[in-house]
């Protein structure tokens, strides 16, 4: 009979294999893949932003192929309605009794992995239909509540440069995304490999390596990863320093309009634990905190008009804060 230690080791081996399967198709983007997997392990959702042609959709599709999970893609458009993604009631007739009744026909949101493609191209009314699902993992329609299958993971994409026909996500919805991941251009070597791999006859065969039960166990393991009290206080200091009305850091007072809330601290600790587990460690280090601070705070620290005019970003503010706050001496680097 397998011991607990053997089960954990087997799960971590599958987790390492997951990334290898995705990399059969996706060249490079190691940090991006790590952040997406971290969001999955932490039980949160992920917003991917990048210019067209950077394989955002392909990355999500490939990840879904490497998992024994149901997958649905929703193409967000200006005419998309909430019922198009949540579902709607349809009138049916009982062939035995002849009585008519309404039956809820579930929409594409009822799946384990949801690719919300170009989420900022649909109006706020439709965007808001995702809020309950993202936070409560359930859907309410016609006074009836329908639970969503777990794990439930939304990966949304948006294009930062195409402004015509787009509706920026409201701050309340942005905060529901655990991570805000920005995808950049590949390096010269990676681009050469992409061109070589995608213009021939060779086709990668991605094998599913993790099932729903495996992911649920990994998500439970994340909660068991240890973090020192000093690191928890460090995270609290980072979050509080982002708030211009309470901080003593001039850089924040000058550029930030609104700082992060307590949910950001929860997200930072959970994703740091997830990253530690992904690296096959059972304790959070300062490197984990620093690595996850940027995608956690990127959409939760709102810049003021002066910062936007001067092209000062939330990432720059985060970097300044991490350099300002003293590191605890008792924690691992």
Image: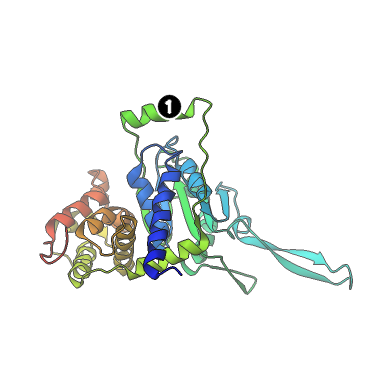
Looking at the image, which residue is at 52% across and 61% down?
212
Is there any visible trace of residue 55 in the rendered image? Answer: yes
Looking at the image, which residue is at 52% across and 39% down?
205
Q: Tell me the residue that label 1 is attached to.
A: 195
* Image coordinates for residue 160, horizontal then vertical, percent: 40, 42
Above or below, 276 relative to 162: below
Viewer-side residue, 159 vs 25: 25
* Image coordinates for residue 103, horizontal then vertical, percent: 73, 67
In the visual, does 48 lie left or right of 287?
A: right
User: Residue 173's image quarter?
Assistant: bottom left
Above or below, 208 relative to 187: below
In the visual, does 13 lie left or right of 276?
A: right
Q: Secondary structure at mark 1?
A: helix
User: Residue 20's image quarter?
Assistant: top left
Is there any visible trace of residue 174 in the rendered image? Answer: no
Looking at the image, which residue is at 49% across and 25% down?
199
Viewer-side residue, 101 vs 114: 114
Above or below, 284 relative to 20: below
Above or below, 57 relative to 294: above
Label 1 neighbour load within 10 Å: few <14, some 14-19, many 20+: few
Q: How many marks?
A: 1
In the visual, does 179 lie left or right of 330?
A: right
Image quarter (top left, top right, bottom left or bottom right) of the C terminus: bottom left
* Image coordinates for residue 179, horizontal then vertical, percent: 37, 56
* Image coordinates for residue 215, horizontal then vertical, percent: 46, 61
Task: Please say which color scheme the image uses.
Answer: rainbow
């Amino acid at each position: 009979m397998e011991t607990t230690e053997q089960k954990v080791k087997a799960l971590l081996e599958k987790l390492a294999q997951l990334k290898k399967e995705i990399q059969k198709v996706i060249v490079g983007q190691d940090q991006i893949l790590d952040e997406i997997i971290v969001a999955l392990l932490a039980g949160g959702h992920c917003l991917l932003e990048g210019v067209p042609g950077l394989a955002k959709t392909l990355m999500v599709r490939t990840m879904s192929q490497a998992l024994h999970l149901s997958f649905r893609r929703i193409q967000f458009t200006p005419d998309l309605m909430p019922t198009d993604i949540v579902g709607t009631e349809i009138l049916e007739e009982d062939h035995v009794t002849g009585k008519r009744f309404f039956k809820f026909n579930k929409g594409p949101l009822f799946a384990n992995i949801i690719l919300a493609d170009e989420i900022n191209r649909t109006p706020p009314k439709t965007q808001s239909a995702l809020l309950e699902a993202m936070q409560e993992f359930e859907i309410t329609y016609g006074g009836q509540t329908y639970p969503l299958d777990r794990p439930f993971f939304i990966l949304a994409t948006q294009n930062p440069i195409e402004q015509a026909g787009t509706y920026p996500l409201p701050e309340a919805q942005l905060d529901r995304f655990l991570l805000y991941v920005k995808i950049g251009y590949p390096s010269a070597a990676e681009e050469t490999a992409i061109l070589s791999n995608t213009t021939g006859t060779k086709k990668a065969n991605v094998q599913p390596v993790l099932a729903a039960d495996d992911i649920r166990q990994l998500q439970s393991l994340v909660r068991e990863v240890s973090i020192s009290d000093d690191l928890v206080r460090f995270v609290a200091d980072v979050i509080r320093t982002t708030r211009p009305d309470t901080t003593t850091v001039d850089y924040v007072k000058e550029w930030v309009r609104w700082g992060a809330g307590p949910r950001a601290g929860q997200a930072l600790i959970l994703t740091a634990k997830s990253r530690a587990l992904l690296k096959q460690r059972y304790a959070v280090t300062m490197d984990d905190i620093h690595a996850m601070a940027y995608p956690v705070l990127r959409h939760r620290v709102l810049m003021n008009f002066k910062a936007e005019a001067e092209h000062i970003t939330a990432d720059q503010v985060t970097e300044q804060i991490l350099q300002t706050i003293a590191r605890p001496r008792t924690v691992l680097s």
